[in-house]
Image (cartoon, grey):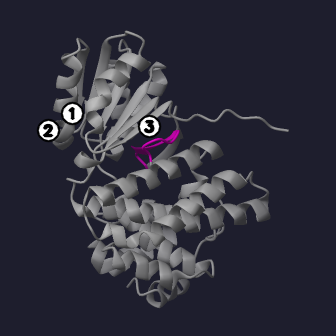
Amino acid sequence: MDFRDVQLPREIHTGAGAIEKLPKLCEKLLDNKKEVVVITGPTTKKIAADHAVELLEDVNFDVTQIIIKKGSQQTVKTVTEQSKNADAIIGVGGGKVIDVSKMAATQNKIPLISVPTSAAHDGIVSSRASIKNENGTVSLKADAPFAVVADTQIIAQAPYRFLVSGYADIISNLTAVEDWKLAHKLINEPFSDSAAALSTLTATKLIEQADIMKLKNIESADVIIKALISSGIAMSIAGNSRPASGSEHKFSHALDIIAPKPALHGEQCGVGTIMMMYLQGGDWKSIRSTLKDVGAPVNAKDLGIDDEYIIEALLKAHQIRKERYTILGDRGLTRQAAENIAHKTKVI
């Protein structure tokens, strides 16, 4: 029997005002070590990071703040160097901030406390990081955050579009798990029943809670954050991003490369899920209807992307992460098939 370590956060704090718990959490988890680096972005600095710094300095933490603009390999290298003498890293921001923080903390072998300011991504607690390089975006193995502080009052203030993006990203678990099952059957790829079940259950429950999303308030943020955390735990159990990333993510990453102005990651994954569910023979109409009901994009126009880029992304998708087998196979789609899928599912 194979045994594998599963990394999960030691503590997870969610709810309105959760960021106020940050000082005591740091004192408890860092065992009186006081030198921390807060990594954030230009916008999230004002939204939450400055307050986090004030809270920590009030209890005598020595805080250095680093502002990043890109989630690139070069940014990871720079931040890793700047935080090499720190006792811990606190990532306060969106997807790229959390992912860069993960990589820097992993390389420096220090704890990371994840403080998300939006619910647009599922990397809040997972042991994976999406980093951009010259060829696009790569998913890298990283240490899971030591702790998570998700203040739903802060997250609810983000544009509703970010919540919807997170919602769509979770719904894409449904096609990701089907791709994983297919790879297990056809090429004997290792498969985790527990990770797959948690991932699918998370997406299914979120579909059932679609009406809560329409409230566009703290309750909506709470539902999405808990789902994103659950999805991240599924990835940590699997030891990879399989439970939440399949052909629909390949499509999204292809769009990132091809489209002059890509939409949000989760938005693109949601549209990809509609088409990939069609390919998989599943209930794509129900997926499309649910996404539309919560205000998520369901076609190229909603994404703000020309129809031709959708087709080109479908043609290129199978070339993204070639080692990951999906419904797209090794050869991908013909142009006629791509156009047919996009038209049948009303994406174009």
Judge whether residue 323 can be spotted in this image: no
The answer to which of 30 and 302 lies nearer the viewer is: 30
Q: Earlier in the sequence, mark 3 or mark 1?
A: 3
273 to the left or right of 30 = right
Q: Nearer the viewer, mark 3 or mark 1?
A: 3
Mark 1 residue crowding within 10 angstroms, few (<14) / some (14–19) / many (20+): many
Please name the residue shown 47% across and 71% down the image: 208
- Residue highlighted by disc 3: 12
Question: Any mark on residue 46, and which?
Answer: 2
Q: Is residue 332 magenta?
A: no
Q: Amino acid at mark 2?
A: Lys
On the picture, is 238 further left or further right than 276?
Answer: right
Amino acid on which the number 1 mark rests in the picture: Ala
Look at mark 1 in the image and give the residue it sits on.
49
Residue at coordinates 75% horizontally, 60% vertically from top-left?
Answer: 184
Q: Residues within 10 Å of mark 2 (few under 14, many from 20)?
A: few
**Residue 124 sits inside the magenta stretch:** yes
Q: Quadrant of residue 120?
A: bottom left
Residue 204 in the image: state x and y as whole percent. Answer: 53, 68
Marks 1 and 2, how far apart at CA: 6 Å
Observer-nearest of 244 and 153? 153
Residue segment shown in magenta? 123-136
**Foreground residue among 69 and 298:** 298
For the residues bearing labels 1 and 2, Cβ distance under 8 angstroms: yes
| Crowding at mark 3 (Cα within 10 Å: few <14, some 14-19, many 20+) | some
Q: CA distance from mark 3 to mark 2?
A: 23 Å
Residue 179 in picture, x, y percent from top left: 64, 65
Residue 25 is drawn in which quadrant?
A: top left
Q: Which mark is residue 113?
A: none
**Labels 3 and 2: the sequence-earlier one:** 3
Task: Assign the N terminus to one quadrant of the image.
Answer: top right
